[in-house]
Image: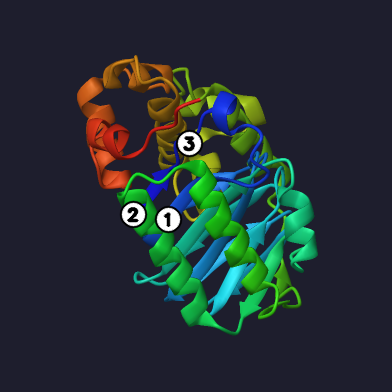
Amino acid sequence: MIFSMRYSSRQDGHIPLLLVYLGHGHALELSRHPHGTDFFLLYYCTQGKGEFTADGQRCIIQPGQAFLVWPHVPMSCKALTQDCTVELLGLTGSCCEAIMSACGMEESGVYQIRDSGMMTDYMERLVALHSSGGQQRDYSKLCYALLTDLSSCIRKLAEVQKEEPASETIQLVLSYLENHYREPVSLDAVAAEVGLTKEYLCVLFKRETKQTILQHLTLIRIGWARLFLEQYPEKKAYEIGKMCGFESPSYFGKKFREIVGLTPEQYRRVNSIVL
């Protein structure tokens, strides 16, 4: 399960360390952020294996290891085994960068955590706090204690391998899909953008990304739909779907549940942000 944490910019804006995402026993799913996020992301692997890429650095993490991504760093992740499970923290705040650096987490990459029990204990306490309706000040105290304790049992691991850069053609396709996900997208239009036949482009894209163009476009659209469901509580689910390029409400609901595991309405009930 994963939660977007409630916070108020008016009431909580002065808190130096803010928790914005909390994931406990979360099945790692395919996720891409070509421009990064506005906050720190810390994934801790408890089971299975996952692949993480940040700014061209690709690494495999396994139980006892964490992957840290600093804000605005392009990243992606995916499970390598069906049982890949992670704990997830999304952190921000005026002092977050200074705290991360002081605790020995000065850059994105893989970190080994010697005391796995400590990490699990803190995550369970954070989830219990969420269940009891905790406030941001309470989360901040627990997260600060967690980072402080991590500083004595965490160390940066050497990079495992560099990511093979995608071809220029595939980069153009990915950029096109990111920029046009709200619109009807045809294979003919994508192929014309890169000057290839659609048949050859489909083969090339599948070979380099291990997914079809439609599959990747759907993941982009669902990713934005998740964000918009949290940001625009006044809008109906079908309106969110249309904002993300889904003309059919039933198809939007079907694909959302297939990828996220919840209906859009269920997702909105358990994930909300109060600004």
- Residue 274's place in the image compared with 72, above or below, is above
Cα separation between marks 2 and 1: 6 Å
Q: Which quarter of the picture shows residue 126?
A: bottom left
User: Residue drawn 45% across and 27% down?
Assistant: 274
Q: Which mark is residue 220?
A: 3
Q: Position of residue 119 (x, y in %)?
A: 51, 73
Identify which residue, 226 or 212, lies in the foreground.
226
Q: Which mark is residue 1?
A: 2
The 10 Å Cα crowd at callout 1, few under 14, some 14 to 19, many 20 or more, is many
Identify which residue, 46 or 80, lies in the foreground.
46
The kind of secondary structure element at disc 1 is strand
Q: Which quarter of the picture shows residue 180?
A: top right
The mark lying in front, picked from 2 and 3, is: 2
Q: Are marks 1 and 3 in contact (CB under 8 Å)?
A: no
Q: Are marks 2 and 1 in contact (CB under 8 Å)?
A: yes
User: Residue drawn 20% across and 25% down?
Assistant: 250
Q: Which residue in the structure is indicated by mark 1?
A: 23
The kind of secondary structure element at disc 3 is helix
Q: Position of residue 251 (x, y in %)?
A: 24, 28
How did the renderer colour the structure? rainbow
**In the figure, is residue 152 to the left or right of 8?**
right
Q: Position of residue 14 (x, y in %)?
A: 66, 34
The 10 Å Cα crowd at callout 2, few under 14, some 14 to 19, many 20 or more, is few
Q: Amino acid at mark 3?
A: Ile
